Every structure is written in structure tokens, then in C-alpha cells.
Image: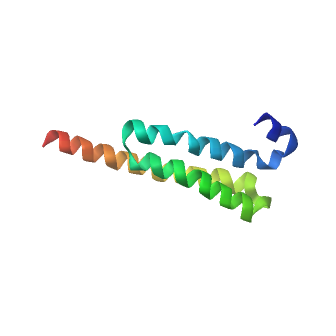
Amino acid sequence: MVGAIFLVPAAVPWFLAVLVGAHFLPFSWVFASRAYVFAAVSIPLVSGAIGLLFPSIVPIAVPLAVVVLLVVTAVGLARANAADRAADRA
């Protein structure tokens, strides 16, 4: 990451997005959640696609895409938690 800051500063958002996405993979195993699998796979793929296809807008597009994907993940987690609570009550 430090090397990227000095060598390719425009790609730093992409590197951060890949790191953010990768850290959700262990959560998907620990919590047995599809939402975390979604985040672990989609964040690196989408940010990678933006980095490869549209390198000039990486500093803006990658953070926006990550925010959208994290919101989708949060909604998925909220729904899963609500379903778990309902199952516990029944």
C-alpha cells in the first residue's frame, strides 16, 4: 500500500477497495452470511473492473461504487438479522 501511494497514487482507491472487500471473507465464514460473501466478492470485482475499464475516474468512481455495495451489504445483513430474530421467536 505504501508503495502504491508513492508509485501510483491514482490507483490507491482501487487498492483500498480490494483490501476492504477481502476482509469480509472471514466474516462470511464466521457469521455464515451471504451478505458478507456478496461484499467479499463484489467489492474487489467491481472496483477492479472500474480500475481496468475507466482508469481516469478511479478516484471518484471506486469510492462511490464501494459505498453502494456496502449499503447493499448492510441491507442484506439487516434482512438476515430480522429473519433470524423472527425464527428465534417462533
Q: Is residue 55 above or below residue 34?
A: below
Determine whether, in the image, residue 71 is placed left or right of residue 19.
left
Determine whether, in the image, residue 21 is placed left or right of residue 53.
left
Determine whether, in the image, residue 54 is placed left or right of residue 76.
right
- Measuring from the top left, give residue 7's x and y in whole percent: 87, 43
Q: Quadrant of residue 56?
A: bottom right
- Measuring from the top left, give residue 74's x and y in whole percent: 44, 47
Q: Residue at x 46, y 49 (%)?
A: 37
Q: Outermost residue toward the left?
A: 90
Determine whether, in the image, residue 5 is placed left or right of residue 44.
right
- Measuring from the top left, give residue 36's x and y in whole percent: 45, 46
Q: Is residue 86 above or below residue 2?
A: below
Q: Residue at x 69, y 60 (%)?
A: 50
Q: Quadrant of residue 60?
A: bottom right
Q: Outermost residue toward the right?
A: 7
Q: Residue at x 67, y 56 (%)?
A: 48
**So how many labels did they put on this image?**
0
Q: Nearer the viewer, residue 66 or 51?
A: 51
- Give the quarter of the figure containing the N terminus: top right
- Measuring from the top left, give residue 82's x and y in whole percent: 28, 45
